[in-house]
Image: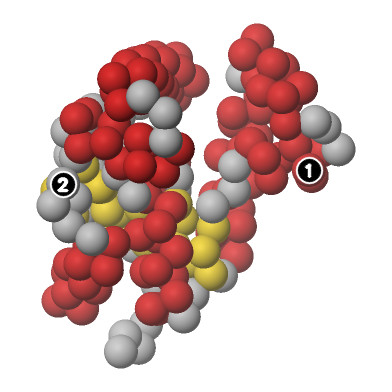
Amino acid sequence: MLNKPLSIAVSGKSGCGNTTTSALLAHRLGVQLVNYTFRNLAVDEGLDFDELRKLAETDDRWDRLVDQRQVAMANAHPSVLASRLAIWVWKEAAFKVYLDAPLEVRAERVHKRENGNLEEKRETTRRRDEADHERYFRLYGIDNDNWSLADLVVDVSARSPEEIVEIILAFVEKQP
């Protein structure tokens, strides 16, 4: 398919299908998927996940450590990096893709994935968006509502992960 080493950063807010799309994309390209999270960091550091989350509430170094490790992993091999901040923190990525969908669509997807009450999922997703926005701006000065540095923005509202991957591959194949 493509005869060049690839580095693709994929970002999107909760419920956009970032992890699923990135995993499919990495598989199709035959490259490493990097999806390093707080769960991975907790294991690596010998900490309980909930303990690490509590530490991270008052100590920004844990967020920075996750981001540093995922970028280092992505730089080690041709990769797809799946992270809410990938397009901003992985400076070396050849292609930066942002997956977008309105809150209603994302909340519906989270509801499908996690069950529960749809209205509660909508409110939880909205609050998470606000908390993430504040945290990313405080940590890095990143406005995650501004995707102007993305090479490609895909509205994922009415698309399956497979369709999204096809859009990304078509875009990448057209690039020099």
**Residue 65 shows in this picture:** yes
Sort mark 1 into few (<14), some (14-19) or many (20+) by Cα contacts within 10 Å: few
Please state which amino acid type lies under the numbered disc 1.
Val
Q: Nearer the viewer, residue 115 or 23?
A: 115
Image point (35%, 42%), residue name: 112
* Placement of 106 over or under 62, stated as above or below: below
User: Is the C terminus in the top left, top right, bottom left or bottom right quadrant?
Assistant: bottom left
Horizontal and vertical percent for residue 50? 72, 24
In this image, 79 relative to 111: left or right?
right
What label sits on residue 13 in the rendered view? Answer: none
Image point (64%, 36%), residue name: 38
What label sits on residue 43 in the rendered view? Answer: 1
Image point (59%, 28%), residue name: 63
Please state which amino acid type lies under the numbered disc 2.
Ser
Q: Which of the two discs, 1 and 2, sits closer to the camera?
A: 2
Image point (27%, 68%), residue name: 162
What label sits on residue 157 in the rendered view? Answer: 2
Horizontal and vertical percent for residue 157? 16, 46
Separation of marks 1 and 2 at Cα, in angstroms: 34 Å
- Disc 1 to disc 2: CB gap under 8 Å: no
In this image, 149 relative to 85: left or right?
left
Image quarter for residue 131?
A: top left
Image quarter for residue 166?
A: bottom left
